Amino acid sequence: MVKSLRDNILPPKEITLTNGKVVKKPRSIAPFVVILVLIAMYYSVQLTGFNLSTLMKRGQQFFVILGRMVPPNWSFFNGVLGPLVDTIKMSVLGTVIGAFLAIPFAMVASINLTNNKVLSGIMKFILSMIRTMPTLVSALILTYIFGLGTFSGTLAIALFTFSFVGKQLYETIETVDMLPYEAMEAAGANKIKSFVAAIQPQVLPSYLSTSLYTFEGNVRHAAILGYVGAGGIGIILNENLSWREYQNVGMILFCLFITVAIIEFISGYLRKKLS
């Protein structure tokens, strides 16, 4: 009885086909994956110097600092408002510029539009290379080129948006139905007109949804760009943390939290309408 129950629950190790041939079930690689993960974790702990006892002893200091932020310094609101507006403006403008520039590059990167594997591969490589660079690092580089301020921060956000939206867009383009596009070209329309008429309606909802999602993240990215002098609320956040003005920091984080929550709610609502 136990054997019959086991046979019903567990899949058979081999199956006999109607022609008499026996097909053996391939061995699972799960044990090897688990072993490799454990080995990787062990060496990661050794290389990073991670110490659980130190975390247990000093981890409560995080909550001590959080406690000093409560209650926030409400009178500091006027000092937060200006940099917060700059952060939002950087996010909006950087997202719009990056999302707009991503369109032609995504068209070139799409293999079903260019029909050139080399050109498509080069464009995909460029988008991947830009995307791997953290926004904070690109903002730091841009401050050396264009100086301190929100202009460098806006360009850093635009670069990230360009690479991320571009990748999502060309992947979407490569999955569309190409028959309407080919019919437009056969009728004499050029590539731009064929794209607008045949492919744009198919990818527009996904493109707008991705742009809105990127905008949500850009607001958070813009909040820390001030650490490298790229403008926004990060400047006063860095200053007040350095001065240990924790109640002012609490006010900054409170305003940032409310702003991000409102933006995510509106963006989520719009993305649901687009889906």
Image: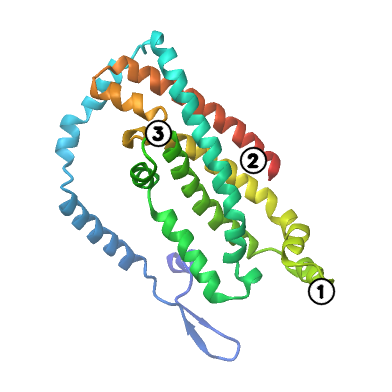
Q: Position of residue 43 (x, y in %)?
A: 19, 57
The residue that disc 1 covers is 186
Dot 1, crowdedness within 10 Å: few (<14), some or many (≥20)? few
- Residue type indicated by callout 1: Ala
Q: Position of residue 202 (x, y in %)?
A: 72, 56
Q: Position of residue 159 (x, y in %)?
A: 47, 49
At x 15% / y 36%, what residue is drawn?
A: 54
Please tell me which residue lies in front, 231 or 4.
231
At x 18% / y 45%, what residue is drawn?
A: 50
Residue 104 against residue 112 in the figure, above or below: above
Q: What is the secondary structure assignment of the residue under circle 2?
A: helix
Q: What is the secondary structure assignment of the residue under circle 3?
A: loop
Residue 69 against residue 212 in the figure, above or below: above
The residue positioned farthest toward the right in the image shown: 187
Please tell me which residue lies in front, 245 or 42.
245
Q: CA distance from mark 2 to mark 1?
A: 35 Å
Please tell me which residue lies in front, 116 or 19.
116
At x 26% / y 21%, what residue is drawn?
A: 65
Please tell me which residue lies in front, 43 or 118.
118
Q: What is the secondary structure assignment of the residue under circle 1?
A: helix
Q: CA distance from mark 3 to mark 2?
A: 32 Å
Left or right: 269 in relation to 39: right
Q: CA distance from mark 1 to mark 3?
A: 50 Å
The residue that disc 2 covers is 271
The residue that disc 3 covers is 149
Left or right: 68 in relation to 190: left
- Residue type indicated by callout 2: Arg
Q: In this rendering, does residue 91 appear at all?
A: yes
- Residue type indicated by callout 3: Gly
Q: Closer to the observer: label 1 or label 3?
A: 3
The residue positioned farthest toward the front in the image shown: 146
Q: Closer to the observer: label 3 or label 2?
A: 3
